[in-house]
Image (cartoon, helix red, strand yellow):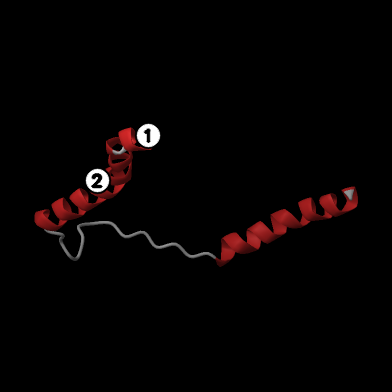
């Protein structure tokens, strides 16, 4: 088993070098091309908040019925 591990350890730097050379990166900076309105941001925020807290609030609300 150890020869396999050693061979993999030797091949890893070569494979990672090939992967790094094959990658191209693009960095975009600046203002967005399409502006999102405040109303849309608020609606998405409310949806995410309701989604995140909905199930825990439902469970907390129904604890008395779970205890029966």
Task: Count neighbours of disc 2 (C-alpha within 10 A) and say few if under 14, some if 14 to 19, many if 20 or more.
Answer: few
Query: Percent position (x, y) of residue 8?
Result: 79, 55
The one of 51 and 42 positioned closer to us in this rendering: 51
Q: Nearer the viewer, residue 35 or 41?
A: 41
Give the left or right position of residue 35, taking residue 18 as reference: left
Decide which of tag 2 and tag 1 comes sooner along the chain. 2
Kindly identify the residue that appears in the image at 72 percent across and 55 percent down: 12
Q: Is residue 52 above or below residue 21?
A: above
Which residue in the protein does label 2 denote? 49
Quadrant (top left/top right/bottom left/bottom right) for the C terminus: top left
Mark 1 lies on a secondary structure that is: loop
Using a 10 Å C-alpha cutoff, classify the residue at mark 1 as few (fewer than 14 neighbours), some (14 to 19) or many (20 or more): few
The picture places residue 21, in percent across and down from the top left corner, at 58, 63
Label 2 residue SS: helix
Residue shown at 31% from the left, 33% from the top: 64
Q: Is residue 56 left or right of residue 14?
A: left
Residue at the far front: name it: 68
State how many labels appear.
Answer: 2
Q: In the image, 9: left or right of 64?
A: right
Spatial separation of the CA atoms under disc 2 and disc 1: 30 Å
- Label annotation for residue 3: none
| Relative depth, front residue between 51 and 19 | 51
Are circles 2 and 1 on residues that touch, CB within 8 Å?
Answer: no
Residue 59 placed where, x, y %? 33, 40
Q: Position of residue 56 (x, y in %)?
A: 32, 40
State the residue position of label 1. 68
Q: Nearer the viewer, mark 2 or mark 1?
A: 1
* Quadrant assignment, res 63: top left
- Residue drawn at x 57%, y 67% is 22
20 w.r.t. 50: above or below: below
> Relative to 38, is 7 on the left or the right?
right
């Amino acid at each position: 088993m150890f020869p396999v591990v050693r061979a993999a350890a030797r091949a890893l730097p070569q494979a990672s070098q090939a992967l790094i050379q094959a990658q191209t990166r693009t960095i975009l900076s600046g203002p967005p091309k399409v502006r999102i309105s405040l109303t849309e941001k608020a609606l998405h925020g409310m949806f995410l908040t309701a989604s995140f807290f909905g199930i825990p609030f439902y469970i907390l609300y129904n604890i008395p019925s779970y205890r029966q």
